[in-house]
Image (tube, grey):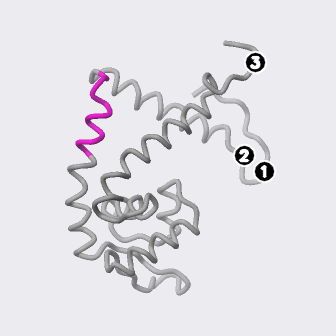
Amino acid sequence: MPNSLSLARFLPYRCNSLARKISVSLSRIYSDRFGLSIPQWRVLVTLAEYGELQARQVTELTTLDKVQVSRAVAGLAERSLLRRRSCDRDSRASLLRLSESGLAMFRRIEPEALAWEEALLAPLQARERDTLFNLLDRLDLQLQAMAPTPDGTERPESAA
């Protein structure tokens, strides 16, 4: 490993750059044809997968912040793609669920998104795909292990 920093070989930069390119390329499917922003798409997919959630839970399940989720929810609600209802356990929170038209939109986009993913992964053999996702999972676990504890102190180094 080199002793000097080079963005081309720096994992955070490479992952961020690739993630951005992937996101922009995929967004052409749901943005151009369905008028969804990247945050709206992520909220739509999350609600399609998990059903009814609070905005706080959507924030935890996506890489979006509170403001992005709030704006995405407002945009989806304005288009009648999701429904809100009061949360019995927390009067300050709303529960979010896709409307029938939101679920129908998701079902129209889903096969195209999966086909796009298949095309992206086409150069990789099945074994390589499994390895890729296993490595991503291991790095994710390592990041969790490296995260500060609730009292703000660093966790001891871990080899995940």
Residue pointed to by mark 3? 4
Marks 3/2: CA–CA distance: 27 Å
Which amino acid, by three-letter code, is at mark 1? Gly
Which picture quadrant has residue 5? top right
Marks 1/3: CA–CA distance: 30 Å
Residue 29 position (above or below residue 3): below
Q: Which residues are magenta?
A: 114-124
Residue pointed to by mark 2? 148
Which picture quadrant has residue 100? bottom left
Q: Secondary structure at mark 2?
A: loop
Which amino acid, by three-letter code, is at mark 3? Ser
Would you call the spot at circle 3 few (<14 residues within 10 Å), some (14-19), or many (20 or more)? Answer: few
Marks 1/2: CA–CA distance: 5 Å
Residue 118 lies in the magenta stretch:
yes
| Residue nearer the viewer, 134 or 90 | 134
Residue 55 in the image, given as x and y percentages of width and height: 49, 71
Residue 128 in the image, given as x and y percentages of width and height: 34, 21
Q: Residue at x 40, y 84 (%)?
A: 85
Q: Quadrant of the C terminus?
A: top right
In this view, the mark in front (3 or 2): 3
Badge 1 or badge 3: first in the primary sequence: 3
Q: Residue at x 68, y 43 (%)?
A: 147
Residue pointed to by mark 1? 152
Residue 13 in the image, given as x and y percentages of width and height: 61, 34
Residue 89 in the image, given as x and y percentages of width and height: 49, 82
